[in-house]
Image (tube, helix red, strand yellow):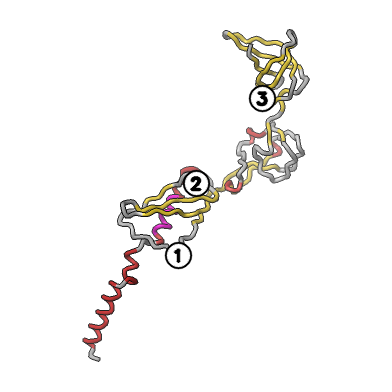
């Protein structure tokens, strides 16, 4: 076969490949890497706006059988309703336009930051002291019950149950101390017309800051409701 004939055959085969269904696939379908890059950029920007700590991001894989029409414009990303800011979450990617499409990708966002833990175990009913506390880095996505970062917020609080050393402190294991005990003599404070009137009473139940309790007024013997405002002090309404 002459060289010229060989080159002609090679050219015809190349043209056929370009216009065959397989040859068109590269330009016909949306680039999967571009979808993943758009989703990653969206999640990284969202995390940077919400968190200051170190973050780690993992995207779920796209179905290898997925075929989406190539988008003629830039891809758009969005946060689906109900998507969690960290932990297991989702991100949306779409191609706008009448022939557009949209899809959802699963993702995992781990956010690390300092949280308060106990230096030593505490029994149930123990009062937390600042000396009992340590700040350590933890994956915040693994703390569904919350956490504390300010020692001042937990110092003086009481453990609801026995707590092990190195345990992360959260509202499930701590509670405010009792400021009023049943049978305790208390001060009743009533405010009216810009005046503050104080009288004596007796608490009929235990109470913490903000709790509503029943008290008996010492002078009249009346039983009334009041709000615990500080140790041994209950605000009542005349």
Q: CA distance from mark 2 to mark 1?
A: 24 Å
Q: Which quarter of the figure is the C terminus placed in? A: top right
> Can you tell which quarter of the image residue 144 is in?
top right
Tell me, yes or no, whether the highlighted magenta stretch contains residue 229.
no
Residue at left offset 51%, top offset 44%: 52
Q: Judge whether 205 appears above or below 71 on screen.
A: above
Q: Earlier in the sequence, mark 2 or mark 1?
A: 1
* Earlier-in-chain disc, 2 versus 3: 2
Crowd class of label 1 (few under 14; some 14 to 19; many from 20; radius 10 Å) = few
Task: Specify few, some or many for label 3: CA neighbours under 10 Å numbering under 14, 14-19, or 20 or more.
Answer: some
Mark 3 residue element: loop
Q: Where's residue 201, x and y in %?
A: 73, 14
Q: Residue furthest left?
A: 4
Q: Residue tagged by mark 1?
A: 64
Disc sitting over residue 83 in the figure: 2
Q: Find the distance from the CA under tag 3 to the CA under tag 1.
A: 58 Å
Give the mark, 3 or 1, whose residue is nearer the N terminus.
1
Q: Residue furthest front?
A: 98
- Tell me where residue 120 appears, x and y as whole percent: 74, 43
Q: Secondary structure under badge 1?
A: loop
Q: Is residue 20 above or below residue 135?
A: below
Q: Quadrant of residue 234?
A: top right
The residue labelled by disc 3 is 211
């Amino acid at each position: 076969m002459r060289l010229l004939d060989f080159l002609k055959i090679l050219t015809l085969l190349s043209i056929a490949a370009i216009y065959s269904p397989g040859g068109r696939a590269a330009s016909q379908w949306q680039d999967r890497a571009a979808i993943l890059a758009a989703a990653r950029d969206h999640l990284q920007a969202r995390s940077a706006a919400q968190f200051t700590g170190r973050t780690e991001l993992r995207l779920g894989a796209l179905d290898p059988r997925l075929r989406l029409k190539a988008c003629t414009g830039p891809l758009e990303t969005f946060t689906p309703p109900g998507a969690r800011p960290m932990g297991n979450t989702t991100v949306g990617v779409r191609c706008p336009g009448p022939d557009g499409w949209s899809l959802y990708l699963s993702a995992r966002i781990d956010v690390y930051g300092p949280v308060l833990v106990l230096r030593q175990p505490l029994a149930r009913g123990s009062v937390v002291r600042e000396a009992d506390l340590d700040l350590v880095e933890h994956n915040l996505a693994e703390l569904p019950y919350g956490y504390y970062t300010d020692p001042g917020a937990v110092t003086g609080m009481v453990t609801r149950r026995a707590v092990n050393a190195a345990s992360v402190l959260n509202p499930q294991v701590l509670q405010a101390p009792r400021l009023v005990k049943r049978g305790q003599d208390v001060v009743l404070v009533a405010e009216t017309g810009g005046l503050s009137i104080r009288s004596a009473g007796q608490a009929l139940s235990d109470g913490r800051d903000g709790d509503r309790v029943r008290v008996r007024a010492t002078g009249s013997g009346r039983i009334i409701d009041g709000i615990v405002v500080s140790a041994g002090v209950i605000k009542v309404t005349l």
